Each structure stands twice: as C-alpha cells, then as structure tokens.
Image (spheres, rainbow, N blue to C red):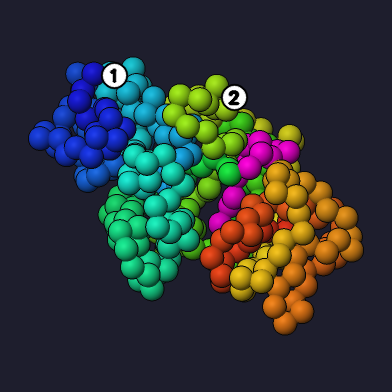
Amino acid sequence: MLALGKLLDLTLASHEPAEKTQVTVGGVRLRWLGEGALEVRPPEGQDNGLDLLLSAGIHGNETAPIELLDELLHGVARGEIKPRARVLFLFGSPAAIRRGERYVEQDINRLFNGKHELSSGFEALRAAELEQFARVFFSVPGRDRLHYDLHTAIRGSKIEQFALYPYKEGRQHSRRELVRLREAGMEAVLLQSKPSITFSAFTYEQLGAEAFTLELGKARPFGQNEQVNLDRLQTRLRQIIEGNEPPADDTLDGLQLFSVAREIIKHSDHFHLHLPADIENFSELSKGYLLAEDLAETRWVVEEEGARIIFPNPKVRNGLRAGILIVPDTGQRLA
C-alpha cells in the first residue's frame, strides 16, 4: 500500500511525509496537502466530474467515522477502490484526535462561517485552514460538489443514524440527495431553516456544495466501534467514489424528515435544562413541558405537537445552543 494511504497514522504521529505525491499502479494520484488532508485524483480520462469532500474527526473522540475514512483511503491506496471522482479526505482536529478528546480548547464545529475570525487559539486557526482546504478543492467551476462531514454523538439516540441538512436562503433542499442518504443508511434527516456555523454549513452556504453533517451513533474510543454499523454508508461512499451508484426510486419511504421548531440558547451560568442527563436524542416531549430556564425569568416551554429534542447539552458556553427542539416535516418544500 502507498505510504500516503496511511493518512491516519501520519496524523496520529504528527508526521509530515517526505514524499508529498504518490501514484497507484492504476494511475490514481494521492497528494498530501497538509496535516490530516489528502487529495485523491482519478486517472486521466476517468474523472466523472464530481468533487467529494469526506471529513471526520472534527471532534477528536468520534472515532468510528475516522476509522471508516481510514478504511476507504486504504482501499484507494491498495488499488482496490478505483476512483472516478476527485476526493478530499480531511481529519478535522488532529490535536483532539491524538488526545482522544472532543476538543482541546473549544469546539471547532462552532467556528466556521466567520466565527474563527472572532476567536483565537489553534482550533480557530484550524477552522480557517479547513475552510481554505475546502475552498480550494471546490474552486473548479462546472463540477458537482458533495460534502459529508461524519460525526458520532455524545449521547445515545432513539434514531441512531441521521443527517443534518444545512440551510441557505433561496436554495431548496434536494430530494435526490435525501434518497442518496436513505440508501446510505440514514434513518432521518433534519432540514435546517437558518444559517449555521458548522463545517457542512460553510461548504453548503459559501461554496455551493450539497453538504451534510452525518451522525452515526455514539462516540467511543478507537477499536471499540463494533456496535456502530456503518456497512451501508461505507458501501454507498465507495459507490460514489467509483461512480457506480445503483439506481434508486425517488420516494422517501423509510426516511423520517424533521424541521427545527426552536433552538434553546444558553445565555448565562444560571441556565438550567430540565432533562435527565442521559436523555437520548429524538426523545419525545409533551406539550406544556418546561424544557429550560435562564436569567430574567426566561423559560422554554414545549408548545409544538410531536416535539422531540436533539443535542441537549447544558455545558456549552454561554451564547451557544444547548439543544434543538424539532418537529416532523412533510417534505413539501423539497426541490
């Protein structure tokens, strides 16, 4: 196997390879762009016009997606996977990956779309670097652009594998991409309705990519991901890379859609979230339930039918989102 195919090993060792470009026997070119960043180009004349960005490890303790990208890249470097798309593999937060921690100083996935310019520290610098990697990769005009940012969650979930679809005013969500997600094993998609500061929101809003945050189960250490079944996703990603996706019907049967009802924002250290510490994502909440309280008698009371909670986290910094209240969506606004 080509040495550059061992991008994860290079990242874990904080090692810069002496040889920055290598070519497989089949003519696939691998190019090291920087720490945790590797570009794959198909052989001359076999490029199908897709630019695919695959990122993982934005949070360093989310190891199942990191291992998945490592396996795919090994397949490319061995010549077992034959790309027809350009692919950029990114391991988002090398320092946190090496520590096995979610982040070191601050959450990188809250530092995109200009937020890193208002912050400091190496994680803000890394967010800017990741934006630049993506900006350069998606700079070629006339090509399809797709970004999957792979994560696992802090807590368990009643719907284990789901996607978040970013929002941009004037742009509709794509039914075709939702079908692709269903075929990749996603059970639900949250259709977002306001701009965000995550990595996938940046590539969707600023670079015109179809972009998604994929939540793939619960975060566990390296080598302990037997319970996270990513077989369907791995198969679909390989098909996308090789340009041989089988046809699928355009119905969304089997895929649950949700939209954001409200975000719960933590304003102060007095914030209190009235939920069990071990509550799972997608847990249902009844109307009238007192969800949270903060200063100045601020109260969040559930008013919506069919409301559920995802990403509840009262430990976030003041001013950040401490949870999302979601409701079922009919999908009538899809393109």
| Residue in the foreground of this view, choosing between 257 and 94 | 94
Q: Position of residue 20 (x, y in %)?
A: 14, 37
Outermost residue toward the bottom? 296
Place residue 173 in its image quadrant. bottom right
Q: State the residue position of label 2.
A: 227
Q: Position of residue 170 (x, y in %)?
A: 57, 67
Q: Which residues are magenta?
A: 155-167
The residue that appears at 66% across and 54% down in the rendered structure is: 312
Closer to the observer: label 1 or label 2? 2
Mark 1 or mark 2, which has the lower sequence index? 1
**Within 10 angstroms of label 2, few (less than 14), some, or many (20 or more) residues?**
few
| Residue in the foreground of this view, choosing between 247 and 323 | 323
Which secondary structure is most common in the magenta stretch? loop
Q: Amino acid at mark 2?
A: Gln
Of the 4 image quadrants, the one containing the N terminus is top left
- CA–CA distance between discs 1 and 2? 28 Å
Q: State the residue position of label 1.
A: 79
User: Is 36 positioned to the left or the right of 147 in the image?
Assistant: left
Determine if the magenta segment contains residue 52.
no
Q: Using the rendered image of the protein, determine whether residue 324 is visible from the camera's viewpoint.
A: yes
The residue that appears at 70% across and 44% down in the rendered structure is: 278
Could you tell me which secondary element the residue under label 2 belongs to? loop
